[in-house]
Amino acid sequence: MGELSVWHWLVVLIVVLLLFGSGKLSTLMGDFAKGIKAFRKTMESEEAHTPPPAAAPPPAIGSEPGIETGAVAEKTPVHHEG
């Protein structure tokens, strides 16, 4: 029931042509094409001007993630009396 066949699309196309006329529809599609071309041109120019992201420096040897430089990690468990 939710499928649209070729006949459904033909009826929609005919109704659109009757409502807008072929002249107005061609003008609308031309404006749409110009907009797409302008969008692509802008995207290409932004990619050309965008510098690549800077690489992060490699971690220091022996450092653990989440521990700041100079911090000492406590390896012994803490026992709470209670």
Image (tube, rainbow, N blue to C red):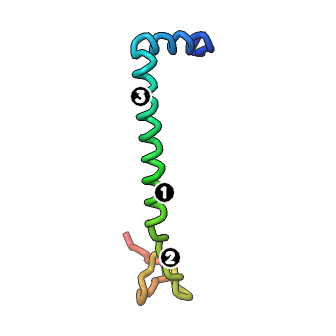
Crowding near pointer 2: few (<14 within 10 Å), some, many (20+)? few
Pick the residue in front: 40 or 5: 40
Tell me the kind of residue under disc 1.
Glu
Name the residue: 47% across, 75% down. 54
Tell me the kind of residue under disc 2.
Ala
Can you give x and y, in whole percent of width and height, for residue 69 in the image?
43, 86
Pick the residue in front: 12 or 4: 12
CB under 8 Å between callouts 3 and 2?
no
Q: Quadrant of the C terminus?
A: bottom left
Q: Residue furthest right?
A: 6
Name the residue: 56% across, 88% down. 61
With respect to residue 11, does 79 lie above or below? Answer: below
How far is disc 1 from disc 2 in space, using C-alphas?
23 Å
Q: Earlier in the sequence, mark 1 or mark 2?
A: 1
Name the residue: 46% across, 14% down. 17
- Judging by the rendered image, the residue that carries numbered circle 1 is 44
Can you give x and y, in whole percent of width and height, for residue 8 in the image?
56, 11
How far is disc 3 from disc 2 in space, using C-alphas?
46 Å
Tell me the kind of residue under disc 3.
Leu
- Residue 28: assigned label: 3
Of marks 3 and 2, the one in the foreground: 3
Secondary structure state at the residue bearing disc 3: helix
With respect to residue 28, does 47 lie above or below? Answer: below
Crowding near pointer 1: few (<14 within 10 Å), some, many (20+)? few
Secondary structure state at the residue bearing disc 2: loop
Q: Residue furthest front?
A: 23
- Judging by the rendered image, the residue that carries numbered circle 2 is 55
